[in-house]
Amino acid sequence: MGKTFAEKILALKSGKESVITGEIVTVSPDVVMSHDNTAAIVKKFKQIGINKVKHPEKIVIPLDHCVPAATEKYATNHKEIREFIQEQKIENFYDINTGVCHQVLPEKGHIIPGTLVLGADSHTTTYGAFGAFSAGIGRSEVASIWATDEIWLRVPETIKVNIKGEIPSGIYPKDVILHIIGNLSADGALYKAVEFSGKVIREMDIGGRMTLCNMAVEMGAKIGYV
C-alpha cells in the first residue's frame, strides 16, 4: 500500500522503515526557525539548564515582526537576540531589513523538498509550497529542540484538495484558499496534512502556492503542501 507524503517524511526523519497515520514518532528536524520571539525562547532554553544549543547550524532566526524596534521592549529583545546569536555561534541570522521570515528562508536556501522544518510561528506551513514537511510549534518546543535536537510528532491524516478547471480573471490564490477554508471550516482540517493538487495548482506560481500553504493553518492543518 502506498504511503502519504507525511508518512514518508516522518519515517525518514525518525529513522524508521515506515510509519502509519496516528503513530507518535520522535524526529530530528532539518531546520528550526524563530523570529522576534527568540528572546522569549532563550529564556525558556536557559531554564532547561543547558548552556549550548546542540546544532546551531539548524537554527535560522530572521528579525521581521517589529522592525525597526517600535518600543523599548522590542529594542531590548533584539539586543538580547543578537547577544545570544554571538554566544551560540549561530550563523543563520538575518537582521532587520532582510525581509519577512517566510520569504527569507526560501530565498536564502534553507528550504528544500523533503526537509522537516519546524518554526515558532503558526504560518510555518508556508514552506510546504516547496515540498517540505513544515509546521508551527510552540516556544517551549523550540527551546527543547535547541537543547536535544528532538521532538515528538503525531503522523497526521491527509486530506487531498484537488482543484480542477481554470481560475477566472480577478480571482487570486488568496481567494482560492479562503473558499477552501470556508467549505472545510476553521477546524475542518484539524491536525491534518492538506495536500493541494490538480491542474490549477500545477499552473500556479510559487507565490500562489506559498499563499495556499501559508493559510492551511487557518483551517487547523498541521501542514499544507504541494
Image (cartoon, helix red, strand yellow):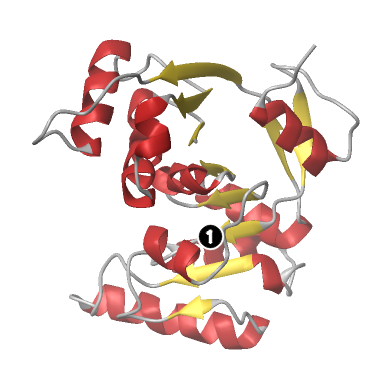
Image: 198 above or below 183: below
Image: 44 above or below 14: below
Which is nearer the eye, 182 or 33? 182
Query: Within 10 angstroms of label 1, few (less than 14), some, or many (20 or more) residues?
Result: many
Residue 38 position within the rendered picture, expressed as x and y whole percent measured from the top left: 47, 66
**Which residue is outermost to the left?**
170
Residue visible at 67% across and 46% down in the picture: 114
* Quarter of the rendering containing residue 215: top left
Q: Amino acid at mark 1?
A: Met
Residue under numbered circle 1: 33
* Direction from residue 12 to residue 176 in the image, left or right: left
* Direction from residue 85 to residue 76 in the image, left or right: left
Image: 77 above or below 47: below
Residue 150 position within the rendered picture, expressed as x and y whole percent measured from the top left: 76, 49
* Direction from residue 153 to residue 161 in the image, left or right: left
* Quarter of the rendering containing residue 51: bottom right
Residue visible at 35% across and 78% down in the picture: 98
Which is nearer the eye, 37 or 99? 99
Residue 122 position within the rendered picture, expressed as x and y whole percent measured from the top left: 41, 43
Count of marks placed on residues: 1
* Quarter of the rendering containing residue 62: bottom left
- In the picture, the quarter occupied by the N terminus is top right
Residue visible at 61% across and 82% down in the picture: 91
Which is nearer the eye, 143 or 182? 182
Image: 124 above or below 36: above
Residue visible at 38% across and 62% down in the picture: 103
